[in-house]
Image (cartoon, coloured by chain):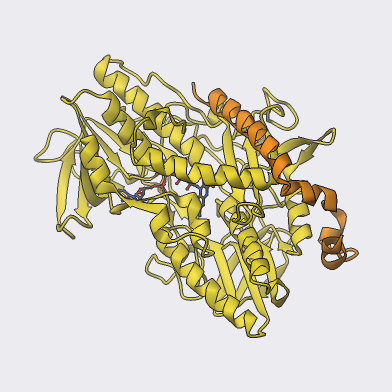
Amino acid sequence: MARVVVLGAGVSGHTASTFLRHWLGKEHEVVVVTPNSKWNWIPSNIWVGCGEMSKEEVVFELAPVYEKAGIDYRQAKAVSIHPEGGENEDKPYVTIEYTGQGKEGQTETVTYDYLINATGPKLNFDATPGLGNGKGGLGDYTVSVCTADHAEHANEELQKLISQMKAGQKKKIVVGTGHGMCTCQGAAFEYIFNIDFELNKAGVRDMAEITWISNESFLGDFGIGGLHLKRGGYAASSRLFAESLYAEKGIPWVIGAHVNKVEEGKLSYEQLDGTEGELEFDFAMLIPPFAGVGLKAYDKKGEDITGKLFAPNGFLKVDADYTAKPYEEWKASDWPRTYQNPDYSNIFAVGIAFAPPHLISKPMKSPKGTPINPTPPRTGMPSGIIGKTVAMSIRDMIEKGADKPTHHASMAEMGAACVASAGKHLTQGMAAALTVYPVVPDFEKYPGIGRDLDYTFGEIGLAGHWIKHILHHMFLYKAKLKPGWTLIPE
Amino acid sequence: MEHIEKNIKPYEPNFTTMVPTNIVRFFRTCVIWQFIRFIIINIKMLAVVRKSHH
Ligand SMILES: Cc1cc2nc3c(=O)[nH]c(=O)nc-3n(C[C@H](O)[C@H](O)[C@H](O)COP(=O)(O)OP(=O)(O)OC[C@H]3O[C@@H](n4cnc5c(N)ncnc54)[C@H](O)[C@@H]3O)c2cc1C
């Protein structure tokens, strides 16, 4: 009998645990440890954040789904990993602290044969003074769309703002990234265009000044160094497309910016060219930087080995090449393929939880030395694919006795399909539908732009909006493990 | 072209970028054209999904 413990039930952890349960015989156990009682289809939080969907439409209760599937579900957060066991326990184990199931605050140890860390990001609001509340949560001055609850709150604030605009008050709106080292620009990009759409719908667009602020050195970098698309006989950069959309919608942009302070109604920033500035706002949605969730690790004797298992940013080390190298020497082969920890072969990390070897965008600094560059995104499709790939390897290690991972999924050999909503309406809605292949550019294989132009494309239109809608229903259906769920691709 | 006249100012950063013309904007929400694009984008996305699973 083997026991696989999966930490986290987001996109990657849920994919890994449900496939493992589907493939492994009943003699093996699959345990999921996750602090939330509900699963959240995060991309649709954007629509919750502008009142086009209710929170209930983007979440569902995990317990009945796991019960039906035969997954041992613990509503708890993992606190520490003990990969060598401990004083009274020979097997490796994790310590967990319950957040639900009537056992709130209770701790427990859970032994494992294989461990998948799929804990996603810690939303590190406190990295920017005023963006956080000093206790790890969202501060008082801005809103967020990163969780369903945040998005619900963002919409409440947005609706108040719209009412005030209807009453004749002019308002300032700022959307973007709240720190020089944020990722997830795409979510902010979606939110700003949905706000623009909603204000037009409410007839108050003229009452709002909307500004974009981002750490990208050029619009359309998206943390992947931008991309090129075939258009009208050209390989056109994503910069042209992004700028075009902002210009069309009358949204000015501040880029290469590190937001260093947020106060009531005002934020301060520093830019790559050394400029320092301030933006006033009545409503601001700023994405926080991400870090690992802060799991600790201890060896058999109880010595702290967190620094051995995790990178300094809190993400778990896997089979990547973490040697510090200049940008010019980065290679596609630096990126992990199996997501196995180099020191403990039964530990894997998937989705946002694994430590990337380096940025994808070129590292940059302001004259003061502040790093201002997007960190690598790991969007839904790569997170799902990586989760499934690791599940396949663990299945083969358990059932076929494989002594090493049997499947691989490098972000330098994998594409991503992204649909960024720009207004929700069946006939007037819009979205930018994009694919990029590979996610991490491979300049050896595709010199110049680093990507295969035949598989990297994008366009704006209603079709993308329909696709976004279908993805919403399809992935919620899949996550609920309804009939035929295994046939839906990640 | 109201969106251009209203939003673009000489020598502002948005002055040097391309901006869609009305015909491009029309096609973005033209249901028949978008239905065709819907089929094409789905095929392209599935090709990327297939290429990404090893
Ligand atoms: C607003 C928004 C919109 C987005 N839109 C898109 C989009 O349109 N397309 C796209 O491809 N991607 C999108 N993304 C990115 C996508 O959501 C992520 O790629 C994906 O969720 C990453 O999956 P994950 O499993 O690594 O992390 P998550 O999905 O965040 O899951 C992490 C899980 O770990 C749990 N956890 C946290 N701490 C612990 C702990 N200590 N112990 C145990 N469990 C823990 C969490 O509760 C959660 O269940 C968006 C992201 C945001 C924020």
Q: Is residue A183 left or right of residue A489?
A: right
Spot the residue most to the front: B32
Spot the residue most to the left: A88
Q: Residue at (34%, 51%) from the top-left corner?
A: A60
Which residue is nearer to you in this view: A267 or A298? A267
Q: Quadrant of residue A252?
A: bottom right
Q: Is residue A82 left or right of residue A339?
A: left
Q: Residue at (31%, 19%) from the top-left corner?
A: A396
Instruction: Report x, y in % for residue A65.
Output: 27, 42
The vertical placement of A331 against A470, above or below, is above
Q: Colour of chain B?
A: orange
Which residue is nearer to you in this view: A403 or A438? A438
Instruction: Report x, y in % for residue B37.
Output: 69, 37
Q: Quadrant of residue A161?
A: bottom right
The vertical placement of A396 against A267, above or below, is above
Q: Which chain is yellow?
A: A
